[in-house]
Image: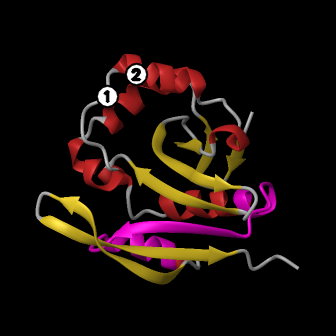
């Protein structure tokens, strides 16, 4: 069982008991713009997803972990996606579900733990993140942990207000020899 511990939070595999949390988060329309969601998810679909969440990252090219506090409450999710073992890279996404728990160091610790895991255990050379223009909290988080801006995808994300740019960030594993 994967369990990566920090001082405030730990990262763990998704469990069947996370169904209600996942249902609330995936159906929260305020995060759809960031997640690219277009329609609600049923509990049945999410249960099927959880039933397969144990599959190996080398098989499904994704790893989604629950960000839990030390009271075992799932407070967010963090993902590795587009896992590419040949080129030793993956994308990173993170969300803290409750806005009251944001800007308290939880996301910083979770992302730091995931970077450590990706670079040491998975032996990745680089991680990247795609952040919608105007998402200053995410820009601050990723820059704080050493991600650097490498480019802009012009008018990449369609929103209710029109198209927005997506900023690309990258972090190279500085501990490689």
User: What is the x, y in percent for residue 135?
Assistant: 31, 70
Q: Is residue 21 above or below residue 101?
A: above
Residue under the point 32% across and 74% down: 136
In this orientation, does residue 77 appear? yes
Q: Which residue is mark 1?
A: 41
Residue under the point 61% across and 75% down: 171
Q: Residues within 10 Å of mark 2 (few under 14, many from 20)?
A: few
**Quadrant assignment for the C terminus:** bottom right
**Alpha carbon separation for disc pair 2 and 1:** 6 Å
Q: Which stretch is magenta?
A: 117-143
Per the image, is 22 magenta?
no
Q: Residues within 10 Å of mark 1 (few under 14, many from 20)?
A: some
Per the image, is 125 magenta?
yes
**Quadrant assignment for the N terminus:** top right
> In this rendering, would 123 be left or right of 64?
right
Residue under the point 38% across and 79% down: 152
In this orientation, does residue 145 appear? no
| 102 or 39: nearer the viewer | 39
**Which element is circle 1 on?**
loop
> In this rendering, would 119 be left or right of 130?
right
Q: Which residue is mark 2?
A: 45
Chosen colour scheme: secondary structure
| 7 or 129: nearer the viewer | 129
Kindly indicate whether the residue at mark 1 contacts the one at mark 2 (C-beta within 8 angstroms). yes
User: What is the x, y in percent for residue 123?
Assistant: 80, 61
Residue under the point 42% across and 76% down: 140
| 168 or 24: nearer the viewer | 168
């Amino acid at each position: 069982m994967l369990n990566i511990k920090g001082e405030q939070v730990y990262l763990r595999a998704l469990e069947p008991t996370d169904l209600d949390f996942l249902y609330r988060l995936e159906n929260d329309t305020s995060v759809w713009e960031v997640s690219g969601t277009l329609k609600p998810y049923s509990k049945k679909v999410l249960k099927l997803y959880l039933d397969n969440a144990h599959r190996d990252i080398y098989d499904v090219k994704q790893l989604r972990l629950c960000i839990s506090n030390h009271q075992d409450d799932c407070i967010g999710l963090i993902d590795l996606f587009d896992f590419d073992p040949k080129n030793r890279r993956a994308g990173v996404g993170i969300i803290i579900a409750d806005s009251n728990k944001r800007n308290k160091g939880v996301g910083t610790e979770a992302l730091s733990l995931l970077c450590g895991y990706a670079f040491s255990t998975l032996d990745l050379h680089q991680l990247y993140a795609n952040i919608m223009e105007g998402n200053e909290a995410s820009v601050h988080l990723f820059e704080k942990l050493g991600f650097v801006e490498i480019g802009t995808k012009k008018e990449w994300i369609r929103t209710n207000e029109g198209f927005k740019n997506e900023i690309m960030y990258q972090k190279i594993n500085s501990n490689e020899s």
